[in-house]
Amino acid sequence: MERTFSIVKPDGVQKNIIGEVVSRYEKAGYRVAGIKMAHLTKAQAEGFYAVHAKRPFFGELVNFMISGPLVLLLIEGEGAIKGVRELMGATDPKDADEGTIRKDFADSIESNIVHGSDAPETAAFEIAYFFNALEQF
Ligand code: UDP
Ligand code: MG
């Protein structure tokens, strides 16, 4: 059984589609093993996206991620890392497949509704970054 980390980003919370995102994961057979809301500090967002620190969009990305509350999700299931990424769709909604979360709801490559871990190593880091042992079920 594999675990991955996902976020309903501030634009998803603003659009009132927290339940829609969670429902898509659940309907695909994944289980919510942890869930909470947070409003990240700049330092927390910078630490989470540290791999992107040198990218030109880093400052905008951090500002977007701290622009409002978001929902932190621990998702479990067979092949959850790849499966959640498939449900999310491509980073740029213009490139996202029909029926994916980003195709259906995202406004742009910057405001793209969801985050999902991209590999076992990043999933382990991201889960531990936001969920302590008592918050994982
Ligand atoms: N992003 C952006 N501009 C870009 C590429 C990415 O604003 O040109 C943002 C976008 O919110 C994306 C996040 O940075 O979701 C992380 O980028 P990554 O390449 O890891 O995409 P993801 O894994 O989220 O699909
Ligand atoms: Mg990524």
Image: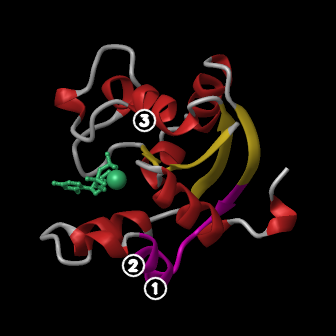
Describe the element under mark 3 as helix, strand or loop: helix
- Residue 71, how many percent across, how many down? 61, 53
Question: Mark 1 is on which residue type?
Answer: Ala
Mark 3 residue's CB less than 8 Å from ligand 1: yes
Looking at the image, which residue is at 47% across and 52% down?
Answer: 9
- Label 1: few (<14), some (14–19) or many (≥20) C-alpha neighbours in 10 Å: few
Looking at the image, which residue is at 50% across and 51% down?
Answer: 120
User: Of residues 133 and 112, which is closer to you in this image?
Assistant: 133
Describe the element under mark 1 as helix, strand or loop: helix
In this view, the residue farthest toward the top is 98
Looking at the image, which residue is at 48% across and 59% down?
Answer: 121
Q: Which mark is residue 43?
A: 1
Label 3–label 2 contact, CB within 8 A = no
In this view, the residue farthest toward the left is 56
The image quarter containing residue 50 is bottom left
User: Of residues 81 and 61, which is closer to you in this image?
Assistant: 81
Residue that label 2 marks: 46
Span colored in magenta: 36-48
